[in-house]
Image (spheres, rainbow, N blue to C red):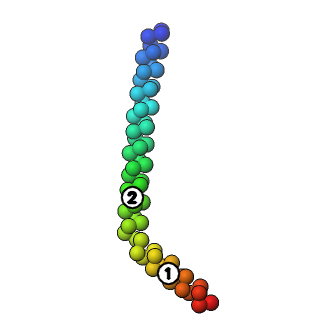
């Protein structure tokens, strides 16, 4: 019975390592998507904020 428990604990600890790697990959992919979006839309967003700032300044 003890051997089965030790074997189960070993498998469970390997799953935690795999899960951590999967989460790290997801975080990396999300970061790449955010950076790509900001890079692609950065100029448009900047001009939008400038337009809003100028409109508020004229009030």
The residue lying toward the viewer, choosing from 4 and 20, is 20
Of all residues, the one furthest to the top in this rendering is: 1
Q: Nearer the viewer, mark 2 or mark 1?
A: 1
> Pointer 2 and pointer 1: residues touching (CB < 8 Å)?
no
Identify which residue is drawn at 54% across, 82% down.
52
Task: Point out which mark residue 31 bears.
Answer: none
Question: In the image, what residue occupies the spot 43% across and 37% down?
Answer: 20
Instruction: Give the residue at mark 2.
Output: 33
Q: Residue 48 location in percent, x, y? A: 48, 79
Q: Please name the residue shown 40% across and 65% down the image.
A: 37
Is 28 displayed left or right of 53 in the figure?
Answer: left
Question: Element at badge 2?
Answer: helix
List the single residue furthest toward the bottom: 58
Residue at 55% x, 82% y: name it. Answer: 53
Number of labelled discs? 2
Q: Quadrant of the C terminus?
A: bottom right
Q: Quadrant of residue 32?
A: bottom left
Residue 50, numbered circle: 1
56 in relation to 33, above or below: below
**In the image, is residue 19 above or below residue 9?**
below
> Few, some or many C-alpha atoms within 10 Å of disc 1 (few <14, some 14-19, many ≥20)?
few
* Residue 2 point in image, percent of width and height: 48, 9
- Give x and y (percent) for residue 39: 38, 67
Which numbered disc flags the more N-terminal residue, 2 or 1? 2
Assess disc 2: are there few (<14), some (14-19) or many (≥20) residues with their C-alpha within 10 Å of its C-alpha: few
| Image: 26 above or below 43 | above
Kind of element beneath mark 1 = helix
Q: Quarter-wise, where is residue 43 in the image?
A: bottom left
The span from disc 2 to disc 1 (Cα, nearest Å) is 25 Å
């Amino acid at each position: 019975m003890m051997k089965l428990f030790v074997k189960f604990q070993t498998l469970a600890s390997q799953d935690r390592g795999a899960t951590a790697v999967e989460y790290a990959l997801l975080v990396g992919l999300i970061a790449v998507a955010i950076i790509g979006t900001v890079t692609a839309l950065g100029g448009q967003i900047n001009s939008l904020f400038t337009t809003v700032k100028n409109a508020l300044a004229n009030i």
